[in-house]
């Protein structure tokens, strides 16, 4: 009988386990599996770890997920806004230029047409793509402040290919339509998304996860002896395996697998951190948007989303709930006070006494970016797989993955293991 170990009980790990014909052991350091797909009940409110929604590129994957979990999910068309210069503008800004002052919108449109006319070849950096697609004005007033607020990094250092499929180039005709008339667009990779009708995102995770999985919770791998096919747990216990799947952050895997080697890839493994402050509020939300972006530096947060605009069951009657996202900072009472002041400034919360629940979640690894040639990572993955170690998931493969991507990769890893085991 084959012995398999999966490190990490998130969506990728349980998908691998559910697609193998023999039992494996999943080692999860937290008290329950789910990774970032966890929900919490606080004072009658249901909060998530952060904003996590199901959206699909693949119709086949969409059908597969809906066939298994469709009864608990509801379909939505995205309603997103941008708070810009004291006004709310529908997302995306480049398709709603008529909502900007004429002198600015005209300049932006002129730059877009000029840049598109002279555009040559593929963009290397995110900055190069944005300037060559939308011009310098829109780049400086919106894209640069937003992305640098989010990532905490000079965006000229971010390879465009790292996020290209989440940020395709808008067609000129669509931009022209938005220049002429006010329009509300549901566009982007998450134009249509799914979310559980009740119970938060963890409801989906529980539906997707097979019930008979062997999950060791509260256990942590501290050493991976891949040459000996052994893992060492934090209590000193050693487990032998025939194959290993690691979904833990790649930085941590390298430390566990190569403790004496200052691995050259580590410095190129960049990520920001996210502080998600969940708030339960008495009253009614005064917006119809699912979430709103805040690119301007005067605001402490980069995005505010509304759980109850998606699922009213996540708050008691007469209340609403929201999540506030800040990048590269830690929670404190002083920070909370500033967040509340900023929310009051834009009218999301009218007074401090409305708050009935506060639940901060600090996410150490949020948006993974590889600041180099991804072929270097592929060499590592191939080397480890030759030694029966498979690296996968958003953080295990250090890829800007959606939930769909994690499921797909889990299935592909399981397929490769079955083929290698000739099953």
Image (tube, helix red, strand yellow):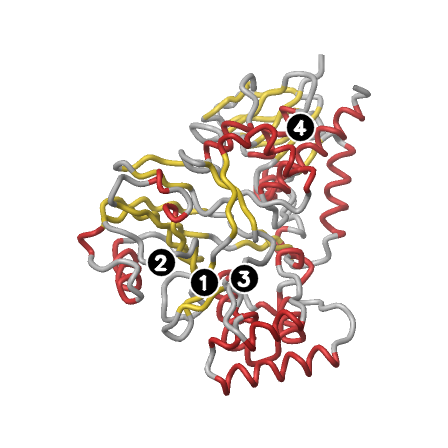
- What crowding class fits label 1: few (fewer than 14 Cα within 10 Å), some (14-19), or many (20 or more)? many
Q: Residue at x 42, y 46 (%)?
A: 310
Q: Residue at x 54, y 62 (%)?
A: 185
Q: Is residue 73 left or right of residue 317?
A: right
Q: Is residue 19 left or right of residue 210?
A: right
Residue 352 drawn at (x, y percent): 20, 56
Considering only order in the chain, which callout, 1 or 4, is on the residue closer to the N terminus? 1
Q: Is residue 258 left or right of residue 421?
A: left
- Residue 138, placed above or below residue 305: below
- What crowding class fits label 3: few (fewer than 14 Cα within 10 Å), some (14-19), or many (20 or more)? some
SS at mark 1 in the image: strand
- Residue found at the far bottom of this picture: 103
Considering only order in the chain, which callout, 3 or 2, is on the residue closer to the N terminus? 3
Label for residue 176? none
Query: Image quarter for residue 11?
Result: top right
Per the model, the C-alpha gap separating discs 2 and 1 is: 10 Å
Q: Are marks 2 and 1 in contact (CB under 8 Å)?
A: yes
Q: Is residue 379 left or right of residue 136?
A: right
Label for residue 287? 2
Q: Residue at x 54, y 34 (%)?
A: 10
Considering only order in the chain, which callout, 4 or 2, is on the residue closer to the N terminus? 4
Q: Are marks 2 and 3 in contact (CB under 8 Å)?
A: no
Considering only order in the chain, which callout, 4 or 3, is on the residue closer to the N terminus? 3
- Residue 278, placed above or below residue 334: above
Per the model, the C-alpha gap separating discs 2 and 4 is: 47 Å
Label for residue 244? 4
The number of callouts visible is 4
């Amino acid at each position: 009988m084959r012995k398999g170990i999966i490190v990490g009980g998130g969506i990728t790990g349980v998908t691998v386990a559910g697609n193998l014909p023999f039992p494996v052991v999943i080692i999860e350091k937290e008290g329950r599996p789910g990774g970032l797909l966890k929900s919490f009940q606080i004072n009658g409110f249901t909060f998530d770890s952060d904003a996590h929604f199901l959206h699909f590129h693949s119709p086949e994957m969409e059908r597969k997920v809906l066939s298994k979990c469709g009864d608990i999910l509801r379909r939505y068309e995205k309603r997103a806004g941008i708070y810009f210069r004291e006004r709310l503008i529908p997302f995306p800004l480049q398709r709603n230029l008529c909502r900007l002052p004429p002198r600015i919108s005209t300049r932006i449109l002129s730059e877009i047409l000029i840049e598109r006319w002279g555009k040559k070849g593929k963009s290397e950096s995110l900055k190069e793509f944005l300037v060559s697609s939308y011009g310098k004005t829109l780049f400086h007033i919106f894209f640069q402040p937003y992305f640098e607020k989010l990532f905490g990094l000079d965006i000229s250092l971010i390879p465009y290919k790292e996020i290209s499929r989440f940020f395709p180039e808008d067609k000129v005709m669509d931009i022209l339509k938005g220049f002429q008339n006010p329009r509300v667009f549901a566009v982007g990779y998450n134009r249509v998304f799914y979310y559980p009708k009740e119970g938060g995102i963890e409801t989906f995770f529980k539906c997707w996860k097979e019930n008979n999985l062997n999950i060791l919770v509260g256990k942590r791998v501290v050493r991976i002896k891949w040459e000996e096919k052994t893992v060492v747990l934090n209590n000193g216990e050693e487990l032998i395996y025939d194959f290993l799947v690691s979904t833990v952050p790649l930085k941590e895997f390298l430390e566990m697998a190569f403790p004496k080697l200052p691995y050259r890839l580590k410095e190129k493994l960049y990520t920001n951190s996210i502080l998600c402050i969940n708030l339960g509020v008495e009253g009614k939300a005064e917006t119809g948007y699912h979430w709103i972006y805040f690119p301007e530096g005067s605001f402490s947060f980069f995005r505010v989303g509304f759980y109850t605009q998606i699922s009213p069951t996540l708050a008691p009657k007469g209340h609403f709930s929201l999540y506030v996202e800040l990048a590269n900072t830690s929670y404190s009472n002083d920070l909370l006070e500033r967040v509340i002041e900023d929310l009051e400034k834009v009218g999301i919360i009218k007074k401090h006494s409305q708050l009935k629940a506060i639940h901060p979640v600090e996410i150490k690894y949020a948006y993974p970016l590889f600041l180099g040639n991804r072929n270097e990572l592929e060499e590592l993955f191939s080397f480890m797989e030759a030694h029966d170690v498979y690296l996968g998931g958003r953080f295990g493969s250090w890829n800007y993955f959606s939930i769909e991507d994690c499921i797909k990769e889990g299935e592909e890893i399981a397929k490769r293991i079955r083929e290698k085991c000739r099953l």
